[in-house]
């Protein structure tokens, strides 16, 4: 069952991307598509904790370096696009969580995370028949109600095809929850950072946000949760991303 729901999540992602790509017209020439970038950030892909020292994070945050804990990606993670480095320090904030109808308050650590560097190869762009701009824009945008409905319909079709989940109310409730978490993200285009940037927020994650940035042939992420105000998190994300990009100069 766990494998099925993993595949279900994958289906939601792939289907939403594919359904979007049908309506895309190329805004770049074939010459632009064939061009190769070579972002200096590629060198940090496998070791994201080499991007910043705790001293640099201390400058961003104004927090004493001794209070900052650096957390490297788990060794089991092999894909560079999944590797991130987290910098945490205590906060006086809490978050309400509900599990099985039980609600509780948990402490929230302040967080700056960087990494998840994905290299856009020509092979992958050719596979989707997309330019870098199209690839990025389609994946980091809010879905319309019609697109959400289309994804839900497709997922329900897959549930009905599987003998273990057909006519299963618990399975449908779990799938609806998964879909809701994945499709309720909001994206805001951000100018002045990299080639393109998009700020992702999700009510499920409170004010925490993710800044997705396209720079030449890579996409990287900056994850911020230092305030209950999304605007404060965004400003910090932009500062971190711009400092990261400055390492290419």
Image (cartoon, helix red, strand yellow):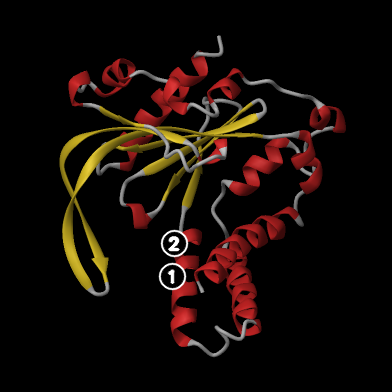
Q: Position of residue 222 (x, y in %)?
A: 44, 34
Q: Residue at x 80, y 28 (%)?
A: 32
Q: On the picture, is 56 further left or further right than 103?
A: right
Q: Position of residue 219 (x, y in %)?
A: 59, 34
Q: Return the residue nearer the eye: 37 or 86.
A: 86
Q: Measure the alpha-carbon separation of dots 1 and 2.
A: 6 Å
Identity of the residue furthest to the front in this view: 75
**Residue 107, placed above or below residue 18:** above
Answer with the quarter of the image where residue 92 lies: top left
Q: On the picture, is 170 further left or further right than 141?
A: left
Q: Are marks 1 and 2 in contact (CB under 8 Å)?
A: yes
**Residue 182, placed above or below residue 211:** below
Q: Which residue is mark 1?
A: 177
Q: Which residue is mark 2?
A: 181
CA neighbours of label 2 inside 10 A, class few (<14), some (14 to 19), many (20+): some
Tell me the quarter of the image containing the C terminus: top right
Residue at disc 2, secondary structure:
helix
């Amino acid at each position: 069952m766990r494998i099925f729901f993993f595949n279900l999540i994958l289906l939601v992602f792939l289907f939403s991307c594919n359904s979007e790509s049908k309506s895309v017209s190329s805004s770049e020439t074939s010459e632009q598509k064939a061009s190769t970038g070579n972002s200096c950030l590629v060198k940090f892909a496998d070791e994201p904790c080499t991007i910043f020292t705790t001293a640099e994070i201390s400058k961003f945050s104004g927090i004493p370096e001794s209070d900052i804990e650096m957390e490297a990606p788990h060794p089991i993670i092999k894909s560079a696009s999944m590797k991130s480095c987290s910098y945490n320090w205590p906060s006086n904030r809490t978050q309400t969580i509900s599990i099985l109808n039980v609600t509780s308050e948990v402490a929230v650590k302040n967080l700056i995370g960087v990494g998840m560097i994905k290299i856009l190869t020509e092979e992958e762009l050719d596979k989707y028949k997309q330019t870098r701009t199209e690839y990025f824009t389609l994946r980091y945008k809010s879905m319309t109600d019609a697109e959400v409905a289309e994804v839900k319909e497709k997922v329900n079709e897959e549930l009905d095809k599987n003998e273990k989940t057909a006519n299963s109310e618990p399975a449908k409730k779990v799938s609806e929850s998964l879909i809701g978490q994945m499709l309720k993200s909001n994206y805001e285009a951000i100018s002045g950072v990299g080639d393109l940037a998009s700020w992702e927020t999700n009510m499920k994650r409170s004010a925490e946000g993710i800044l997705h940035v396209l720079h030449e042939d890579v996409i990287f992420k900056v994850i911020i949760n230092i305030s209950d105000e999304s605007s404060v998190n965004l400003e910090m994300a932009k500062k971190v991303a711009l400092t990261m990009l400055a390492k290419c100069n």
